[in-house]
Each structure stands twice: as structure tokens, then as C-alpha cells.
Amino acid sequence: MSEDATADVVVSAGVTEQVSGGQTAQTAAQTPWTAGFKDAELAKHPAAAKFKDAESVFKSYTEAEKRLGGMVSIPKEGDAEGWKKFYGKLGVPDSPEKYEFEEREFQGIKLGKNEYQDYAKVAHEIGLTPAQVKKLAEFDFQRQTGAYERVQKQIKEAETARSEAIKKTFAENHESMTAKVKQNIEKFADDESRAILMSRVEKDPEMFKLIANMSSQFSEDSIPQSPAKDSEADATAEYQAMLMDMNHPLNIATHPAHKQAVEKHNRLFNVIHKSK
């Protein structure tokens, strides 16, 4: 071949250059990197335009494979083992005992891990993560304490309203009538019922009116005395029984009837020593 007729063809990275003797090299149009695909439809797929060559495709594939390796598929209903693995990948512990709970205290009651055992079991059954359980436990504690405080507020408001109703009913005689009511309770009620009546009469208008009306039917001088146990022998026996019975209100400072028991103790003591 002559030099003019000679055509050197150089192929590099999909680009064909043809150089004719004495002429400037002309770059031919690029051949698509998908030109060698056997599947013509696949070769024309729009996604091919996102890549410049096979190397960039392979790199994208390996990155996608890494991401897919961290993904989980949602199991079908009834696939217990599948759901266990699924929840495990989400961070759910393998047993309820693995949940941690913050210790709290309310109204003298301490709440810790032992008190949250049933809570932890349910949380584990429905697949909650430790962070979710912690947040829900905090919310539940605030909800319950808030409800308790609202109830206590309502009780106090109701008690105040009842006390005001009592005062309104008896007007200027309220103080003297209250004294008579309490006096009659002291005279006729035993130790156990005395404490209950004293607490209720100040909050229950109907009970207050009942005892107040009974008190108004007789004067102080005509009020019959409670059955006497004022003989020295009876007083001594009852006095000693109170001291010996460790479950008696006298010996339990926190008992609601403790104050009345102390007063009775003093009365018996006076009876015993007056007779001597």
C-alpha cells in the first residue's frame, strides 16, 4: 500500500481515530459503551445514560449491594422466627429482662425494674426498642401521677365545698354546733368508730346535720352518759389490757384512733388513782 492509501486505525476506550497521511487526526463519533450488548432493548435502556462505562456500572452495583446488606424485609404473618430476626435487627432485645428502667418514686412508693416486669413483657411481645420503652415508661409515669394529682385536687375542692355548705346551713351557730357534735361523738362512739366519725363529720354535711339535730334534742345536762366502766376493778382491767395489747390503737402512733385511745388511757388512769 502507498503512504496516501495507508489508513492506521487506533482504537482506545471506545473511540476510533483514523489518521490519513499528512492530515490532522479526526476523532470519530463515540460508540456507546452498551454497543456490545446482545440484548438490544437493554442496550437502549435510559438508565445506561447515567454511566460512562462498565467500570462505573460495576462500582454502583457493589455500593448498592452494601446498602442492601443492611436492609431487612418485613416477615409474613405467623412467621415467628422471621419476626424475631426482624425485631432483633431493629434493636429489640432478645428477652424482656434486657430492658432498663429509670427508678422513680411517688407518694413514698418506689418504682424500679421489679415493678416494671409486666410492662417489660408486653413491650417485648409487641417488639418495642429500648428507646421506645424508656419514652413510654416516662409518659405512663407522668400520666398516672398527673391523674392522681387531679383526683386529689377534686377531692379537696369537694371537701371545701361540703365544709362551706355546713357553715352556710348553721350560719352563726356553726362553731357551737360543731363543738356539740364532736362532744357527742366523744361520749357515744367507741375508739374505732370515733376516729372515722370525726373525720367524716367535718366533710359530710348530711352526717353533720344528723348528729347536730340529735344534739339539739337534749341539753348538756340531759345527755345520758355512756355505759360506765368507772369502777376501779373494771378501769384497772381495761387499762392493763390496753397496755398489753400491742395492736391496740394506744400502742400504734400512726393508727387513726391513737389520739382517742390516749385520751381514754388518761381517763382510766385518773379513775384508778382517784379511788386510791
Image (tube, grey):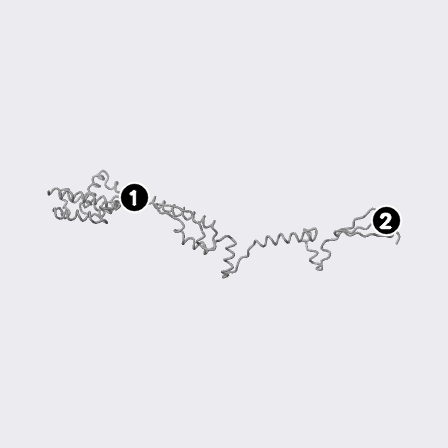
- Residue at the right extreme, as displayed: 2
Q: Secondary structure at mark 1?
A: helix
Q: Secondary structure at mark 2?
A: loop
As drawn, is 59 to the left or to the right of 190?
right
- Residue at the front extreme, as displayed: 244
Specify the quadrant of the image occupied by residue 38: bottom right
Quarter holding the N terminus? bottom right
Decide which of tag 2 and tag 1 comes sooner along the chain. 2
Three-letter code for the amino acid on which mark 2 is drawn: Gly
As drawn, is 179 to the left or to the right of 233?
right
Q: Position of residue 240 (x, y in %)?
A: 17, 47
Specify the quadrant of the image occupied by residue 219: top left
Three-letter code for the amino acid on which mark 1 is drawn: Glu
- Residue at the left extreme, as displayed: 276
Numbered label attached to residue 40: none
Residue tagged 1: 159
Q: Nearer the viewer, residue 66 or 142?
A: 66
Residue tagged 2: 21
Residue name at image x 86 percent, y 49 percent: 21
As drawn, is 16 to the left or to the right of 130?
right
Q: Nearer the viewer, residue 82 or 35?
A: 82
Q: Position of residue 172 (x, y in %)?
A: 23, 38
Q: CA distance from mark 2 to mark 1?
A: 115 Å
Q: Nearer the viewer, residue 115 or 210?
A: 115
Residue name at image x 29 percent, y 44 percent: 159
